[in-house]
Image: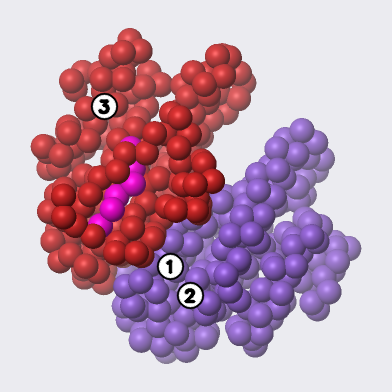
Chain colours: A red, B purple
């Protein structure tokens, strides 16, 4: 594939999927390089030296310019491709609404959901030790608080998180939420707003939504978790 | 004061100070409205209804347009005032370097430092109960990990976090770091890079740096903590 944009990622990474979906939707050409997360390839010294000193994915190399942090990459790509504007709007106030969510996202959705996922599913898998119920309960409560704010506040006024239009705010949020299926946590139970919103976002982003989530959903099947979407 | 930009904040808030400093540096006119954090004014239903549904500060109201999340507000103001470009550069790659830090900031610097501060100082003050040593040790370890990445990675190549120029990346980072003085934690011990960087950032941002931190440093004095800067 002839392109100067190298994309280092893995579809088991939530922000990796978000960036993949939006690059596909905006028709940005890129060379995809899968990093073996399970084997800890991202945590090696050679990865740090050659690819990303922060030892995280996703990250890019755009003709020699290395950049980490999915949302920073999104903003950078938006300066290069006008097609992203459909997903990351350009007007001062409409963009600010999307940005407001993207900032809130880190400590509320990304932080709490990924922490719960890690404690409930990933760590037990890696260490062969069951999660501590008290610790899990604390993380679960924090996650539920954020999900309820998503249901009752961000989605209260319209079909999508910002400006009543689908945007990267929805995409970054939903990729964290989809991950919870693997930890056997049903986000939609008691949250009809999130349930309907998830269907709308999936529809707006397909076929790339399903393409990005196929490996996650297959992994759910492998571990016996419910995945109505596959 | 005649201006359409209302700024709801409190100088005891770290992101509140960051935004205050950059607005002063960029000569953006605003009307400052202090929210009584200690009395929980930000958490009331009237605050949620009238000012910010997320119940957080800082937030703004710009001629009827309400916005929360300090970094989203910064970006929004950057679309309105060209003077911010000195602190939040406009070129695709130079801005991406600042954005890369601002994204990393949330879960690493903001999250870990504010969590430690809350557990070590704020909660004991509010509840009159001493912090649990085990919980504090876990939070302290996470905070130290982030501070070491700041010392050894972000500051390894130059005088400032991004592009070897002072920027909002430095300002958002340093306001979280200054807060730790109140929890009696000396960030600069064993971290000469952070120590020298803090002096550079303070100098670049004065007189507004000292103006923004005066209340914090006075509070340190009140509680008998070391504050060499006052």
> Residue B114: image x %, image y %?
63, 52
Residue B201 lies, with reference to residue B69, above or below; the image says below
Residue B50 in sight: no
How far apart marks 1 and 2 lie (CA) works out to: 7 Å
Picture residue at 30% right of the left edge, 31% below the top: A178
Whether residue A16 is in magenta: the answer is no
Q: Are marks 2 and 3 on the same chain?
A: no
Residue B70 location in percent, x, y? Answer: 46, 65
Q: Is residue B38 left or right of residue A146?
A: right
The reply to whether the magenta stretch includes residue A8 is: yes
Chain letter of disc 1 in the image: B
Dot 2 falls on a residue whose secondary structure is: loop
Query: Is the residue A31 above or below the residue A181 in the image?
Result: below
Q: Are marks 1 and 2 in contact (CB under 8 Å)?
A: yes
Residue A215 numbered mark, or none: 3
- Mark 2 is surrounded, within 10 Å at the Cα level, by few (under 14), some (14 to 19) or many (20 or more) other residues, namely some
Label 3 packing within 10 angstroms: few (<14), some (14-19), many (20+): some
Marking on residue B163: 2
**In which quadrant will I find the C terminus of chain B?**
bottom right
Q: CA distance from mark 2 to mark 3?
A: 38 Å
Instruction: Provide the residue designation for mark 1.
Output: B97
Q: Chain of mark 2?
A: B
The answer to whether marks 1 and 2 sit on the same chain is: yes
Q: Residue at x 16, y 55 (%)?
A: A2
Count every numbered label the image shows and give the total: 3
Q: Can you tell which quarter of the image residue B148 is in?
A: bottom right
Q: Nearer the viewer, residue B69 or B98?
A: B98
- Residue at x 32%, y 39% (from the top left corner): A34
Of all residues, the one furthest to the right in this rendering is B224
Taking the spot 75% from the left edge, 67% from the top edge, the residue there is: B192
């Amino acid at each position: 594939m002839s392109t100067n944009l190298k994309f280092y990622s893995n579809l088991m990474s939530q922000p990796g999927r978000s960036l993949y979906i939006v690059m596909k939707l905006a028709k940005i050409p890129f060379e995809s390089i899968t990093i073996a997360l399970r084997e800890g390839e991202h945590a090696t010294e050679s990865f740090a030296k050659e690819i990303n000193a922060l030892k995280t994915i996703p990250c890019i190399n755009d003709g020699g310019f290395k950049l980490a942090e999915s949302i920073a990459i999104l903003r950078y790509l938006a300066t290069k491709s006008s097609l992203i504007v459909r997903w990351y709007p350009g007007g001062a106030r409409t963009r600010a609404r999307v940005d407001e969510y993207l900032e809130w996202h880190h400590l509320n959705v990304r932080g709490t959901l990924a922490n719960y996922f890690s404690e409930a599913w990933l760590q037990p898998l890696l260490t062969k030790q069951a999660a501590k119920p008290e610790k899990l309960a604390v993380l679960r409560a924090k996650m539920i608080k954020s999900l309820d704010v998503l249901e009752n506040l961000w989605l209260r006024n319209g079909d999508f998180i910002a400006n009543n239009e689908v945007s990267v705010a929805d995409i970054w949020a939903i990729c964290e939420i989809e991950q919870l299926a693997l930890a056997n946590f049903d986000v939609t139970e008691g949250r009809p707003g999130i349930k309907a919103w998830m269907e709308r976002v999936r529809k707006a982003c397909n076929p790339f939504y399903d393409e990005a989530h196929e490996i996650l959903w297959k992994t759910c099947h492998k571990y016996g978790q419910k995945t109505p979407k596959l």
